[in-house]
Image (spheres, helix red, strand yellow):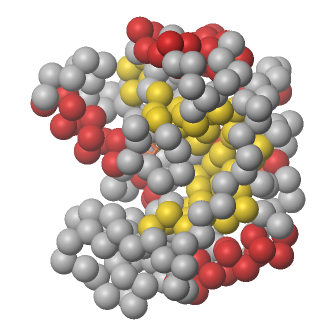
């Protein structure tokens, strides 16, 4: 099982990555990859350096129970070092396991859009982009909106500033979360409420994942504060799985 609140399992046929924007600063996958490398875990021999792991491609085919998979929690499927032919292999597995739903999240939205110009999006794949700030994050939304997918989502985590007005046409789900760990950057409640209110107006499902290292009072906690309540309640709606 995954510890990530909005999925069930992770599937990592690619590991390792290169940082592209401020949301990458304290990349969890980087820290975890180095730890797994030190422990001698198979697949992490190169640490956080991009590595394809074809031996993992068939993993979801071995599981019959309908499962929500987060694809490449330890990497970014659409980085330039992953060939379109390898992405084809990932999509083939997705297509031949219709019992599962796959969440594919990227910061390389342009490359994702280029790939899907010539490939149909599998019905059971949800496509998402990270929107951590205005400068790098918001332009990814347009790329996502240009793709003909049944379910499109945004991940505003770690949310680094007020995103202002969002154009949410064709967006089905938004996840918001604060940053955790040493050096975490604070997230303000009003930034979160701005997104929540726009989701409510546009009938977009809203998921508040966590505050992160900072409380909603703006005070940094000594240890990880994983509070999940926003204005006294949980916000954890999620789109229906395509079945
Ligand atoms: S794109 Fe994702 S996996 Fe890659 S460095 Fe940034 S946060 Fe880490």
Q: Residue 64's image quarter?
A: top right
Q: Is residue 22 left or right of residue 66?
A: left
State the residue at coordinates (83%, 76%). 201
State the residue at coordinates (73%, 79%). 197
Is residue 114 among what the camera can see? no
- Is 192 drawn above or below residue 18 in the view shown? below
Q: How many marks?
A: 0
- Is 200 drawn above or below residue 170 in the view shown? below
State the residue at coordinates (71%, 40%). 241
Is residue 102 among what the camera can see? yes
Ligand 1 positioned in quadrant: top left
Q: Is residue 35 left or right of residue 7?
A: left
Choose between 55 and 134: the one closer to the eye. 55
Residue 135: % across, % down: 61, 64
- Is 180 drawn above or below residue 115 in the view shown? below
Q: Is residue 127 left or right of residue 47?
A: right
State the residue at coordinates (55%, 67%). 208
- Is 5 drawn above or below residue 108 in the view shown? below
Residue 59: % across, % down: 47, 16
Q: Is residue 121 left or right of residue 61?
A: right
Choose between 235 and 225: the one closer to the eye. 235
Choose between 26 and 70: the one closer to the eye. 70
Q: Residue 114's image quarter?
A: top right
Quarter of the image that includes the N terminus: top left
Residue 174: % across, % down: 66, 60
């Amino acid at each position: 099982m995954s510890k990530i609140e909005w999925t069930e399992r992770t599937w990592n046929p690619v590991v390792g990555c290169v940082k592209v924007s401020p949301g990458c600063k304290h990349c969890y996958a980087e820290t975890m990859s180095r730890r797994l490398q030190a422990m001698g875990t198979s697949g992490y021999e190169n640490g956080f350096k991009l590595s394809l792991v074809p031996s993992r491609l068939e993993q979801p085919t071995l599981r019959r129970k309908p499962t929500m998979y987060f694809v490449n929690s330890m990497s970014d499927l659409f980085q330039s070092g992953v060939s379109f032919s390898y992405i084809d292999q990932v999509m083939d597995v997705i297509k031949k396991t219709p019992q599962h739903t796959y969440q594919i999240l990227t910061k390389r939205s342009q490359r994702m859009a280029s790939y899907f110009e010539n490939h149909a999006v599998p019905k059971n794949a949800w496509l998402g982009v990270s929107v951590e700030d205005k400068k790098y994050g918001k332009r990814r939304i347009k790329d996502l909106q240009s793709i003909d997918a049944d379910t499109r989502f945004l991940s505003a985590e770690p949310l680094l500033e007020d995103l202002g007005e969002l154009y949410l046409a064709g967006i089905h789900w938004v996840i918001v979360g604060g940053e955790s760990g040493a050096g975490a950057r604070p997230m303000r409640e009003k930034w979160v409420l701005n997104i929540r209110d726009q989701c409510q107006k546009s009938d977009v499902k809203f998921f508040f994942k966590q505050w992160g290292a900072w409380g909603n009072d703006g005070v940094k906690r000594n240890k990880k504060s994983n509070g999940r309540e926003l204005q006294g309640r949980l916000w954890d709606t999620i789109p229906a799985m395509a079945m």
